[in-house]
């Protein structure tokens, strides 16, 4: 019996897009300034770093794992590269981002090795590697910030680059950051890998059933290495990109980002049980999370309550995901 694909409007992505549209309309009615180009450009900018990290977490969640080490990997890669550039008076654009990506990838390889070779629980592994990465960074390299007065000029130029620059009513300027293109390019690459390559299909297969994936011939070790190394590489890249956008390197940065990123990925329809998730859904989930946090800031709500809201969103998204998966099984 042939099995028809569900209509597009019944897909998870369509439902998430519908929720996003409704939320945008409601927020715009409460605060019309939401629709200003200045605010929309700011939202797009806020999506970049968390979105790139979410792409990596998406891969791991599709494979049935969980990763809480990516913020520590991001800060380690970012701070080591910036510190080296400052101490040795180095400049450049390509090699610093390549170095940060490789540092993240190497740390991701540690996660993959522990999860695959020792058959350890991903949450425990990534908790341990995150603690080790942050501890070693602060204990060996240091805890002092690299502020804008010492920050490498070449990285500042990356963060300053705009696709469009406009002038507001008060005479100030604002723009759409060029890093949005980097985010969209990486998202397209991850989407193509997941949908058009065998390694991408193996990630879905492993997440749905590791034993079945092994029986049909997928090399599950390679699958895990691909997922964790890519997630680490994306975290390292995103860490340095974040630093270039704020013109500062703080070795204590990204604390608490685990919750935000995982919440965004789950909001986008990825299953915590593995085997399900998409790049488009994740990008929509990231946008919803960033938009709601941004709106809470505009309304002057304390950051403590923002954490409550994010926690509630995560619980609601996980509950909906579990109900969806249970319905699919029945």
Image (cartoon, rainbow, N blue to C red):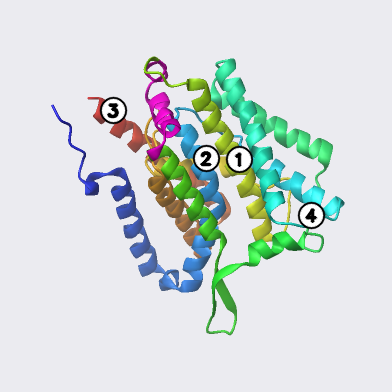
Label 1: few (<14), some or many (≥20) within 10 Å? many
Label 2: few (<14), some or many (≥20) within 10 Å? many
Prevalent SS, magenta region: helix
Is 102 positioned to the left or the right of 217 in the image?
right
Please check the rendered image and state whether residue 210 is part of the magenta-colored stretch, yes or no: yes
> Is label 4 in a helix, a strand or a loop?
loop
Total count of labels: 4
User: Distance from label 1 to label 2 (Cα)?
Assistant: 8 Å
The residue that appears at 71% across and 50% down in the rendered structure is 95
The extreme left residue here reads: 1
Q: Earlier in the sequence, mark 3 or mark 2?
A: 2
- Report which quarter residue 150 is drawn in: bottom right
Of circles 4 and 2, which is in front?
2
The extreme right residue here reads: 88
Residue 120 in picture, x, y percent from top left: 56, 18
Of circles 1 and 3, which is in front?
1
Which region is colored magenta? 196-214
Position of residue 209 relative to residue 55, above or below, is above
Residue 148 in picture, x, y percent from top left: 77, 62
Q: Which residue position holds label 2?
A: 56
């Amino acid at each position: 019996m042939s099995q028809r694909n569900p209509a597009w409007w019944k897909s998870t992505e369509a439902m998430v897009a519908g929720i996003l549209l409704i939320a945008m309309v409601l927020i715009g009615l409460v605060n019309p300034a939401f629709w200003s180009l200045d605010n929309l450009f700011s939202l797009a900018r806020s999506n970049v770093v968390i979105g790139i990290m979410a792409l990596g977490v998406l891969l791991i969640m599709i494979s049935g794992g969980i990763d809480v080490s990516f913020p520590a990997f991001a800060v380690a890669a970012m701070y080591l590269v910036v510190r080296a550039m400052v101490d040795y008076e180095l400049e450049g654009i390509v090699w610093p981002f390549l170095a940060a990506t490789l540092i993240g990838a190497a740390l991701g390889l540690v996660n993959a090795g522990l999860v695959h070779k020792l058959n350890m629980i991903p949450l425990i592994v990534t908790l341990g590697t995150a603690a080790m990465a942050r501890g070693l960074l602060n204990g060996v390299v240091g805890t002092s910030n690299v502020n804008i007065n010492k920050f490498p000029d070449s990285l500042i130029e990356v963060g300053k680059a705009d696709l469009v620059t406009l002038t507001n009513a008060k005479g100030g300027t604002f723009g759409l950051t060029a890093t949005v293109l980097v985010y969209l390019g990486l998202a397209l690459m991850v989407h193509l890998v997941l949908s058009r390559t065998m390694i991408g299909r193996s990630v879905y297969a492993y997440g749905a059933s590791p034993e079945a994936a092994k029986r049909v011939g997928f090399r599950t070790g390679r699958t895990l290495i691909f997922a964790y190394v890519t997630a680490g590489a994306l975290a390292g890249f995103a860490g340095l990109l974040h630093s270039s956008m704020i013109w500062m390197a703080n070795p204590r940065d990204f604390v608490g980002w685990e919750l935000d990123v995982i919440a965004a990925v789950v909001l986008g329809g990825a299953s915590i049980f593995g085997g399900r998730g998409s790049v488009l859904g994740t990008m929509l989930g990231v946008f919803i999370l960033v938009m709601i946090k941004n709106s809470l800031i505009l309304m002057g709500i304390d950051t403590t309550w923002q954490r409550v809201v994010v926690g509630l969103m995560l619980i609601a998204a996980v509950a909906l995901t579990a109900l969806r998966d249970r319905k699919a099984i029945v």
